[in-house]
Each structure stands twice: as structure tokens, then as C-alpha cells.
Image (spheres, rainbow, N blue to C red):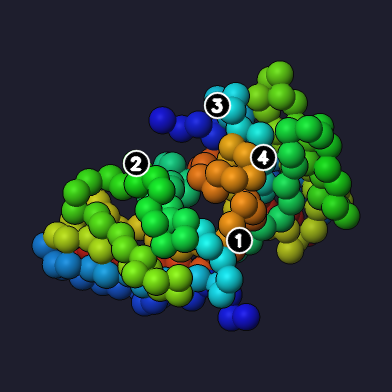
């Protein structure tokens, strides 16, 4: 049962443009959401997170938007750079005391120079 | 800190053999996770420990899979007997208690032939 879904397996954008990666979840109990970035042959690394009490969190070129009513979150990268090319995983968990984090299948982002 | 350390990085074994994957979490982290990465499902949570105690092993696919955490600095994931469909990259991650940002190891690529 996939509680966290990333329906786009891949995305290609031009350098300098905006990259938008989407994620949907089914469990309304999730209240903490994270994005991880993964390069080939490396483990995922934490990128940005958002708590359900917010609808937006920004960190430099990266912004995560949360729409609780739609059970949807998105990661915006502006402007996109070739070094952003990686697989991006969306993750969700229930409460800060519950470390049972569920991941989506990932979206492979390719930023073309 | 060296981060989460996994060994081996690569493992090739014959079907039916026992496989043991090892993980050393970041010192001071009280939660440890084992994930399996597949193309279709992304990162699947297999089991997670808190203070060396297994909290949720519902993601363990079959009885052939077992995990232990004998102390705060070491965990193993064992597959016995291994099957070709177990071929995947297995990640270990750790996080501070009551925190939700997990730090991942570089993974073990398992190939069962």
C-alpha cells in the first residue's frame, strides 16, 4: 500500500527554468513531510521539510508547498541548475515522535544546460 | 562524524545463500531504519528500531528477512535464504530520537544470482 505517491517517474527541464516535483499522500495522519535528493551510488540526503502547520517553506532556491486538503505537496526549484539533476524522494511521517517515514517512488530530475 | 556506515557496498551471492548487511548509525542517534530501494516502489521501509528495540517490522517482506540491533552502534539485516528477487539496494538510516530527519548510508547493492 503506497501511502506516498510520486506519479511522475521523470522530469526534464532547461537550466534556469523552474522545476516542479509533485507528491501525493493518502494517510491524513501524516503531519511532517520531507524531500530527499539522491545522486547515483549515494544514499539519499535531506533537502527540505515542512510541518503540517505551514503551507510553505523556503530555503534558497528550494520551496516546498503543502496543500493539506488535497493531500498534495510540491517541491519547486528556481532557478534549476544542472547540479540539481538527481532523483528526488518525497517522504512523510506522523508526528515528531514517530520516525516511521514513508517514501514515494522518486522522480528523476534532469536539468539540461 | 563519518555518517552512517554500511558494509559491504556491493554483495553478489548465489540463490539460497545467507546474506548479512551491516550498519553503523551516527553516534548519538537513537533511531535506526532499514530501507530497500526498488524501481517501482522507491524506498520501502523494512524495519525501524528505537533505542535498539524493533518498533515496526511490518515492512519486512518475508520470514527470510530478519534484523537485529544488539547495541546502539550496530545493526544487521539478514536474508536467509536469499532469492533473485531480493536483488536491490538496501539503505540504512539513523535519526535522533523525536527527530524526523534521517541520515542515510551509501547503501549496499545486493545481487542474488
**Chain for disc number 4:** A
Contact check, label 1 and label 4, Cβ < 8 Å: no
Query: What residue is shown with label 3?
Result: A27
Same chain for labels 2 and 3? Say yes or no: no
Same chain for labels 1 and 4? Say yes or no: no
Same chain for labels 1 and 2? Say yes or no: yes
Query: What residue is shown with label 1?
Result: B96
Q: Which of the labelled discs sits on residue A32, or is there none?
A: 4
Same chain for labels 2 and 4? Say yes or no: no
**Mark 1 or mark 3, whichever is nearer to me:** 1
Residues packed near mark 4 inside 10 Å, few (<14), some (14 to 19) or many (20 plus): some
Mark pair 1, 3: CA separation: 24 Å
> What is the quadrant of residue A63 in the picture?
top right
Mark pair 1, 4: CA separation: 15 Å
B98 or A105: which is nearer to us? Answer: B98
Image spot of residue B65 (x, y percent): 24, 55
Contact check, label 2 and label 3, Cβ < 8 Å: no
Mark pair 2, 4: CA separation: 21 Å
As helix, strand or loop, the secondary structure at mark 4 comes to strand
Q: Which of the labelled discs sits on residue B58, or is there none?
A: 2
**Chain for disc number 2:** B
Image spot of residue A37 (x, y percent): 64, 56
Q: Identify which residue is drawn at 67% across, 40% down.
A: A32
Q: Identify which residue is drawn at 37% across, 53% down.
A: B54
Amino acid at each position: 500500500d503506497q501511502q506516498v505517491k510520486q506519479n511522475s517517474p521523470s522530469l526534464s527541464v532547461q537550466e534556469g527554468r523552474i522545476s516542479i516535483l509533485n507528491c501525493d499522500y493518502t494517510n491524513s495522519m501524516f503531519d511532517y513531510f520531507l524531500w530527499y535528493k539522491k545522486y547515483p551510488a549515494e544514499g539519499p540526503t535531506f533537502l527540505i521539510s515542512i510541518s503540517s502547520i505551514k503551507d510553505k517553506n523556503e530555503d534558497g532556491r528550494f520551496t516546498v508547498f503543502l496543500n493539506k486538503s488535497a493531500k498534495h505537496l510540491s517541491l519547486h526549484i528556481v532557478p534549476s541548475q544542472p547540479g540539481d539533476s538527481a532523483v528526488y524522494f518525497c517522504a512523510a511521517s506522523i508526528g515528531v515522535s514517530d520516525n516511521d517515514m514513508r517514501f514515494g517512488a522518486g522522480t528523476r530530475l534532469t536539468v539540461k544546460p | 562524524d563519518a555518517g552512517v556506515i554500511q558494509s559491504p557496498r556491493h554483495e553478489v551471492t548465489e540463490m539460497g545463500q545467507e546474506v548479512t548487511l551491516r550498519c553503523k548509525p551516527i553516534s548519538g542517534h537513537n533511531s535506526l531504519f532499514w530501507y530497500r530501494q526498488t524501481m517501482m516502489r522507491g524506498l520501502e521501509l523494512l524495519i525501524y528500531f528505537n533505542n535498539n528495540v524493533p518498533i515496526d517490522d511490518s515492512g519486512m517482506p518475508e520470514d527470510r528477512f530478519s534484523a537485529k540491533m544488539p547495541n546502539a552502534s550496530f545493526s544487521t539485516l539478514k536474508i536467509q535464504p536469499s532469492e533473485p528477487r531480493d536483488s536491490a539496494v538496501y539503505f540504512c538510516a539513523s535519526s535522533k530520537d523525536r527527530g524526523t530527519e534521517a541520515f542515510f548510508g551509501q547503501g549496499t547493492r545486493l545481487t542474488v544470482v
